[in-house]
Image (cartoon, rainbow, N blue to C red):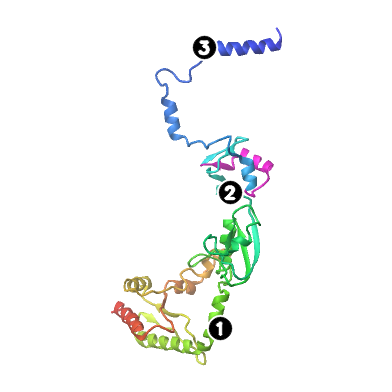
C-alpha cells in the first residue's frame, strides 16, 4: 500500500470514527466554565488590524525581525495577555505593552521651529494663526508643542508626539521637578519668557523700595517672635544685607507641622523650604547613603511665613497674632 493511500485511510478513519468527548457525562461543561472564569480574556485578533511586529516597529522600539523575537520570548502583551503568536494582529483600541510599558504604533517624531511673531502657541483651532499651521506639513503624525511662547514672542519651539521625552524636557526647564519638592533629574530654571523679562525691566527701578518693604516686614516678624521660646528667628551677620526672599523660622518644639495646619485652618499659607533634603532627592541618589544630621533636622523644623513687598500691615498683624495664639 502506498504512503499516499495510508494518509487517506488515516484521514477517513478520523472522519468516520467515533469522536472522543473531552469531558465525561457527569462533569460536562463544568471544567470549561470554571476555567473561563479564572482565565484572562484573550486579546482580539482581527484581520482588519495591524500585525503586532509592525506595530512594535512603528513605535520605534526595534525592527520587525527583532520584534518577532521579543514576541516569542513573551516580552509583549495585548490587553493584559502575553502574546507569543506570530502574525497576531492588533486593533486600534488594543493596549500593547512592551516589557510592561505601554507603547504607541506611531514612530517618535521631533520637529524644531524658529517661531516668528504673530502665531499663538496652542493646538486649538479657534485662536487665529497658530504654530500648528507652521508645522502642518512637517509630519503626518499629530504633534504637540513643548512649552509655550507668546503670540508676539520669537524663539525656538520643539514639537513631538513623544510624551515621555516631553515630560523630561519640561522637568529640565524647572529644576528637574516631577512634582512639588521632588527632583528626579538635575535641571535648570528657564521659566522666564520675554514678556516676564519686559515686566522686570520696568520694575527694576523700584527694586530698592521692594527690598526695603520686605526688610520692614522681616523686622516686624522678628520683634513679634523674639520672645517666643519655641521659635528661632533668622539671624543676620554684621555688615551684611538681606532681601528676605523668604522669611523662615525654626520651630523648636517639634510642632512645625501642627503650626502649619493651624495657620492653614486660619487661611494663612506657609511653605517648607525644603521638606526633602538634596541628598535624598532622586537626582542625587548616589549620595542617599550619607548622613547629614543638621540638614535632616532643618527639613523637619523650618517654616516660611508669607512675605511680600505689597502685603498690608493689617494682613501681617493677622499672621503674627495667629502664630502667637498657637503658642499660648
Residue 228 visible: no
| Residue with the most extreme bottom position | 239
Residue 69 in magenta stretch: yes
Instruction: Say if 90 sits above or below 122 in the image.
Output: above
N-terminal of the pair, mark 2 or mark 1, is: 2
Contact? badges 2 and 1 (CB < 8 Å): no
**Quadrant of the image for the N terminus?**
top right
Local secondary structure at mark 3: loop
N-terminal of the pair, mark 2 or mark 3, is: 3
> What is the x, y in percent for residue 166?
58, 60
Task: Mark 2 vs mark 1: give the one in front.
Answer: 1
Instruction: Say if 58 sits above or below 174 in the image.
Output: above
Pick whichever, 34 or 276, lies toward us.
34
Residue 149 in magenta stretch: no
User: Which residue, given by chain and number where applicable, does mark 3 sit on?
Assistant: 18
Residue 89 visible: yes
From the viewer's perspective, tell me whether residue 3 is left or right of residue 101. Answer: right
User: Which residue, given by chain and number where applicable, does mark 2 sit on?
Assistant: 104
User: Which residue, given by chain and number where applicable, does mark 1 sit on?
Assistant: 201
Q: Tell me where residue 51 sits by quadrant.
A: top right
Local secondary structure at mark 2: loop
Q: Residue at x 39, y 19 (%)?
A: 26
Local secondary structure at mark 1: helix
Instruction: Say if 48 sits above or below 211 in the image.
Output: above
Q: Which residues are magenta?
A: 59-79
Q: Residue at x 48, y 17 (%)?
A: 21
| Mark 2 and mark 3: Cα distance apart in space | 49 Å
N-terminal of the pair, mark 3 or mark 1, is: 3
> What is the x, y in percent for residue 42?
51, 36
Q: Residues within 10 Å of mark 1 (few under 14, many from 20)?
A: few
Q: Tell me where residue 144 sits by quadrant.
A: bottom right
Amino acid at each position: 500500500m502506498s504512503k499516499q493511500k495510508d494518509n487517506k485511510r488515516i484521514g477517513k478513519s478520523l472522519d468516520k470514527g467515533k469522536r472522543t468527548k473531552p469531558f465525561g457525562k457527569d462533569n460536562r461543561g463544568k471544567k470549561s466554565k470554571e476555567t473561563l472564569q479564572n482565565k484572562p480574556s484573550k486579546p482580539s485578533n482581527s484581520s482588519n488590524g495591524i500585525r503586532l511586529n509592525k506595530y512594535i516597529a512603528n513605535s520605534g522600539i526595534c525592527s520587525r525581525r527583532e520584534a518577532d523575537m521579543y514576541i516569542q520570548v513573551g516580552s509583549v502583551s495585548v490587553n493584559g495577555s502575553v502574546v507569543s503568536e506570530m502574525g497576531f494582529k492588533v486593533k486600534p483600541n488594543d493596549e500593547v505593552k512592551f516589557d510592561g510599558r505601554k507603547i504607541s504604533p506611531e514612530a517618535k517624531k521631533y520637529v524644531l521651529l524658529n517661531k516668528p511673531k504673530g502665531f499663538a502657541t496652542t493646538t486649538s483651532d479657534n485662536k487665529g494663526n497658530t504654530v500648528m499651521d507652521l508645522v502642518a506639513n512637517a509630519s503626518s503624525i499629530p504633534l504637540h508643542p513643548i512649552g509655550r511662547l507668546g503670540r508676539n514672542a520669537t524663539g525656538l519651539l520643539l514639537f513631538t508626539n513623544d510624551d515621555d521625552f516631553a515630560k523630561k524636557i519640561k522637568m529640565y526647564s524647572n529644576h528637574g521637578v516631577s512634582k512639588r519638592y521632588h527632583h528626579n533629574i538635575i535641571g535648570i530654571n528657564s521659566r522666564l519668557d520675554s514678556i516676564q523679562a519686559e515686566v522686570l525691566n520696568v520694575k527694576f527701578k523700584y527694586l530698592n523700595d521692594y527690598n526695603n518693604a520686605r526688610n520692614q516686614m522681616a523686622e516686624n516678624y522678628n520683634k513679634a517672635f523674639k520672645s517666643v521660646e519655641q521659635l528661632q528667628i533668622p539671624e543676620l551677620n554684621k555688615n551684611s544685607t538681606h532681601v528676605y526672599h523668604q522669611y523662615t523660622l525654626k520651630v523648636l518644639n517639634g510642632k512645625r507641622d501642627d503650626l502649619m495646619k493651624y495657620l492653614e485652618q486660619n487661611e494663612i499659607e506657609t511653605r517648607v523650604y525644603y521638606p526633602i533634603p538634596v541628598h535624598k532627592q532622586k537626582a542625587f541618589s548616589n549620595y542617599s547613603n550619607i548622613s547629614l544630621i543638621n540638614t535632616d533636622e532643618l527639613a523637619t523644623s523650618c517654616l516660611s511665613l508669607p512675605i511680600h513687598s505689597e502685603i498690608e500691615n493689617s494682613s501681617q498683624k493677622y499672621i503674627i497674632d495667629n502664630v502667637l495664639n498657637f503658642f499660648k
